[in-house]
Amino acid sequence: MPRLQPLYEKYRDRGFRVVAVEATHDTETAKKFIADKGLTYTFLEDNDDANVVRGLFDVHSFPTAYVIDRRGKIMYYHLGFEPGDEKAIAKQIETLL
Amino acid sequence: MWKRGLIVGALVAAAAIAPGCSRHQAPAQSEADAYKAAKAAYYKAESPEEKAKIGERYLEQYPGGAHAAGMADLVIEYRGKELGEPDRAFATVDGALQKTTDPELRFELGMELLPLSYEVKKPLDLAEITRGLEASRPLTFNENLDVMEAAVKHSNWALAQAHADLALAQATPETYRADHPNSKANDAKIKRAVNRRTTFALAYKAWAQFNLGQQQEAMSLFKQADGGATFNYLGVCDTPLRRFWGEAELAQGNWDRASELLEPSALFGADQAALADLRQAYAGRHGSEAEFDAYLWKERERRARKVDDFELPDYKGVKHALSAEEGKVTYLAFWFPT
């Protein structure tokens, strides 16, 4: 997650955003993590009623991410985050901007 | 295979307890203390060297310890991968394996060590590791799945087929319920889970058959299995069925059919193997890879799913709808803090 911050800062003015949805309702740990790492993009918290992560998107492995184009189409998928993935993601973002 | 997250996620911030003189303690007590100490040390550890040493120390003292597989994972990940010393990592874990007689632990450690054993060209005998456990009890469905996966990776087709047959016999509601005694799943959910087990087992069986030269039987089994195929949110088959079937069609030079089967996982499944296969199918069809990237782009555009809208609160309680900032390129991540 911290590795998304530089991407956010680099591309936000060109119409890029990051939306992170926390899946386990671990509110305090998440808030501390976000503050400690100085993350400024959008963080949302799932709940049992909305059940967005496991219900709507059927996600069970983490981290899972979608790169979505300006029309809302999911163009790329990522499972896990290895060092160096930022380069591939930056390339993908640039093709969609 | 091993869930390192179990160590990280279930942290106990226990004071580091030195194992002390084990002559005055029952062995089980010492091992439990050593594991507690290891977890606490891992929580504080910052460098890969420190983390590797935690695993190495434990395996030195408790090669047959209850947590040996998790500790082996630390050694393999940090000593073997991050610090780039695979031979040393292998020696440590193999050393522990040699000192372990319990078939359950031998199986766990063996499965953990298997990929590295191939990397350092000292391959473990998967059939032997499996037989050891089977002598004391039948493998569970998930264990059969792990063995099938490893067998296929290392082209042990007969072993893959044998375990696919065992797994197929476990694709029943009764077995599923017995494996998940605390599950509150209703009949519909169980039916889906059993269906998935069947599809997994048939996919491996068919792929093993194909590689054993029984191509006609394999192709008809793929087709049969596809009747129960299930797909995730992005339309990617959530078992290896379509990837194996695609590779079979590719081997037979059926480029169009192979492409159709491989496109979803290559494009939206982050499956590098499927992507490489798709490239091969493309080259087969067109005689060159020249326009492959353009083709990929076109297929992405054609197949991409529109993301569902949803509304959730942020940590200040403010509600956000995903569609509120339509027109932006979005990186949507699902995560949890560790």
Image (cartoon, coloured by chain):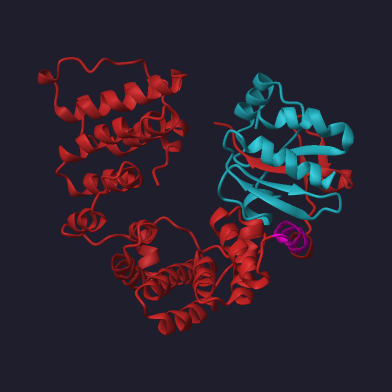
Chain colours: A cyan, B red
Q: Position of residue B119 (x, y in %)?
A: 35, 44
Which residue extends farthest front?
B287
Relative to B316, say whether B199 is above or below.
below
Q: Based on the displayed image, in which of its 4 quarters is residue B315 positioned?
A: top right
SS majority, magenta = helix
**Is B229 a magenta residue?**
no
Q: Residue at x 36, y 60 (%)?
A: B179
Choose between A48 and A3: the one closer to the eye: A3
- Name the side, left or right, on which B158 lies relative to B251: left
Asked whether residue B321 is in view, the answer is: no
Task: Residue B94 in the image: state x and y as whole percent.
Answer: 23, 38
Q: Is residue B3 above or below residue B204?
A: above
Q: Residue furthest left?
A: B23
Along the line of sight, the residue nearer the viewer: B145 or B141? B145
Q: In the figure, is residue B286 to the left or right of B206?
A: right
For image coordinates 16% across by 59% down, the residue present is B135
Question: Relative to B129, is B281 on the left or the right?
Answer: right
Question: Which portion, as a residue range, is magenta?
Answer: B290-299
Q: Quadrant of residue B255?
A: bottom right
The percent position of residue B257, horizontal first and vertical second, equals 61, 76
> Does residue B326 lie above or below B15 as drawn?
below
Classify the position of the C terminus of chain B by image quarter.
Answer: top right
Total tally of numbered discs in the picture: 0
Left or right position of B80 against B104: right
- Examine the rendering and report whether any part of residue A32 can be seen: yes
Residue B74 vs residue A56, the one in the foreground: B74
